[in-house]
Amino acid sequence: MLLTAKILLTLATLGYSAIPLAFDSNKTHWFNDSWTPHGRFHCVWQVMSYVYMALIALGLIWTASSVNWQIWLSAGLAACAYGGFWTAVALRKKLGLALVDDVNGVPPFMLPVLGECDANVTLFTTAVILLGTGAGALSLAAATVAAN
């Protein structure tokens, strides 16, 4: 069960680090001339902070030999990263934020079952499900160890 948890936490960690790095380090974000240089600065700062956080989290995940504080810490780091995203989603109307940039952003994502969905919400919902499932697997692994 611990291996399953590690794999799921790895996928959740890559979701908050590798996905933003791949999708934002291009003309839609980092090199978007319609954004102010200071706005692009904050985007690079945020994405790279998550990449560096993820490197620590991956080290914690894959050096853990049991269900201990270091693997729970990696899950907590992922929860913080996703919590920031969902906070921005929740505050978007109040603060005048948008999930997409109609001029330079990522186009809407089409799901055969649900129709048009936002790509960020779709990807990060999936990643949060992986995180929750990984945390559940960690809890089961800890319970198994405690029972033995």
Image (cartoon, helix red, strand yellow):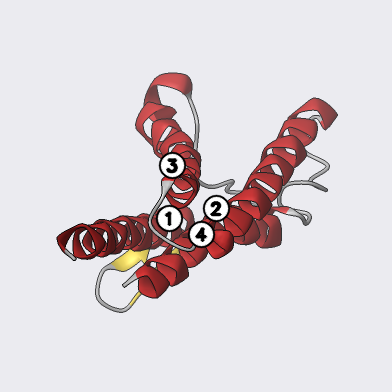
Precedes in sequence: disc 3 or disc 4 = 4
Please say if the residues under marks 4 and 1 sit with CB atoms less than 8 Å apart. no
- Distance Cα–Cα, label 1 vs label 2: 8 Å
Give the position of the C terminus as an image quadrant.
bottom left
Category of crowding for the residue at label 2, using alpha-carbon neighbours closer than 10 angstroms: few (below 14), some (14–19), many (at least 20): many
Give the label, 1 or 2, closer to the camera: 2
Give the label, 4 or 2, closer to the camera: 4
**Amino acid, disc 4:** Ala
Precedes in sequence: disc 4 or disc 2 = 2
The quarter holding residue 1 reads bottom left
Q: Position of residue 135 (x, y in %)?
A: 31, 55
Residue with the mark numbered 4: 64
Category of crowding for the residue at label 1, using alpha-carbon neighbours closer than 10 angstroms: few (below 14), some (14–19), many (at least 20): some
Label 1 SS: helix
**Amino acid, disc 2:** Tyr
Q: Is residue 46 above or below residue 27?
A: above
Label 3 SS: helix
Of 25 and 47, nearer the camera is: 47
Residue with the mark numbered 3: 76
Q: Position of residue 128 (x, y in %)?
A: 36, 54
Could one spot residue 35 in this view of the protein? Answer: no
Residue with the mark numbered 1: 124
**Amino acid, disc 1:** Phe
Give the label, 4 or 1, closer to the camera: 4
**Amino acid, disc 3:** Gly
Residue with the mark numbered 2: 16
- Distance Cα–Cα, label 3 vs label 1: 16 Å
Q: Extreme top residue here?
A: 94
Q: Position of residue 98 (x, y in %)?
A: 49, 38
Please say if the residues under marks 1 and 2 sit with CB atoms less than 8 Å apart. yes
Give the label, 3 or 4, closer to the camera: 4
Q: Residue at x 31, y 59 (%)?
A: 138
